[in-house]
């Protein structure tokens, strides 16, 4: 997603190759305009330009909800920080309305601080539980966050990556 308002122009944070593959990069885009970025005919990403953060959050939640409804056992790659919170709030609302079921979804978070206890308010484990997981019906056994309390960080990272590979990789990365 690209955030655009009267003070900002579209920005890409992907690799140089991805940016070059996007015909029309840097052109002014209208609200909710969609276009595909491709390389040799293969779609790399679909870009949707939104007016503001609330609109971006709703559009992102629609994409996640669409995947969860089409593939109930999908694997979501989740991120922390303030950017996805609006999307998470929209997903919670859809769940509360009975429009989403997370019971089969698996999640893999991108990262975690090290060393840090799961109970520490600054840990990503704490954040994800507080912001999303405690509000939806995701099976806690399907939630995967790197262990910030592991004795051996290198071993934890290798095991985490192996677990993700065995699960089949991520269907959608936030």
Image: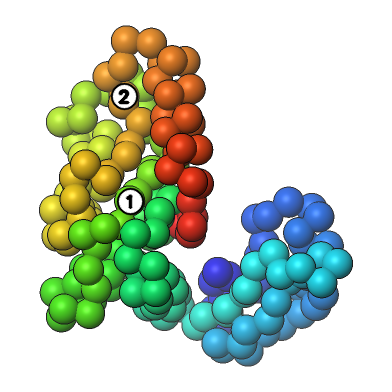
Image coords of residue 6 (percent x, y): 57, 81
Mark 1 or mark 2: whose residue is earlier in sequence: 1
Disc 1/disc 2 C-alpha distance (Å): 20 Å
Q: 151 and 67: which one is in front?
A: 67
Left or right: residue 68 compared with residue 140: right
Residue 57 appears in the figure: no
Q: Height in image: 36 above or below 164?
A: below
Indicate the colouring scheme.
rainbow
At horizontal 71% and vertical 69% (from top left) the residue drawn is 43
Image coords of residue 149 (percent x, y): 27, 19
Q: Secondary structure at mark 2?
A: loop
At horizontal 30% and vertical 57% (from top left) the residue drawn is 105
Q: Secondary structure at mark 1?
A: strand
Image coords of residue 15 (percent x, y): 73, 51
Q: Say which quarter of the image contains residue 7.
A: bottom right
Q: Height in image: 144 above or below 150?
A: below
Q: Height in image: 134 above or below 94?
A: above
Left or right: residue 66 compared with residue 120: right
Tell me the mark number nearer the camera, choosing from 1 and 2: 1
Residue 12 appears in the figure: yes
At horizontal 21% and vertical 42% (from top left) the residue drawn is 141
Label of residue 1 in the image: none
Image coords of residue 28 (percent x, y): 71, 82
Left or right: residue 136 compared with residue 148: left
Image quadrant containing the N terminus: bottom right
Q: 16 and 94: which one is in front?
A: 94
Location of mark 2 (residue): 148
Q: Say which quarter of the image contains residue 33.
A: bottom right
Location of mark 1 (residue): 106
Q: 92 and 32: which one is in front?
A: 92
């Amino acid at each position: 997603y690209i955030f655009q308002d009267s003070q900002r122009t579209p920005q890409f944070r992907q690799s140089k190759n991805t940016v070059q593959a996007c015909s029309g990069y840097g052109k002014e885009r209208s609200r909710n305009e969609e276009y595909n970025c491709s390389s040799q005919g293969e779609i790399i990403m679909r870009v949707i330009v939104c007016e503001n953060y609330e609109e971006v959050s709703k559009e992102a939640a629609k994409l996640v909800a669409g995947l969860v409804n089409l593939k109930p056992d999908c694997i979501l790659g989740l991120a922390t920080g303030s950017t996805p919170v609006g999307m998470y709030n929209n997903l919670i609302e859809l769940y509360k309305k009975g429009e989403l079921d997370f019971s089969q979804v698996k999640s893999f978070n991108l990262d975690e601080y090290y060393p840090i206890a799961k109970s520490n308010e600054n840990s990503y484990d704490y954040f994800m539980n507080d912001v999303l997981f405690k509000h939806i019906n995701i099976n806690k056994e399907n939630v995967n966050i790197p262990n910030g309390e592991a004795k051996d960080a290198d071993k934890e990272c290798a095991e985490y990556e192996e677990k993700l590979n065995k699960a089949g990789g991520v269907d959608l990365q936030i």
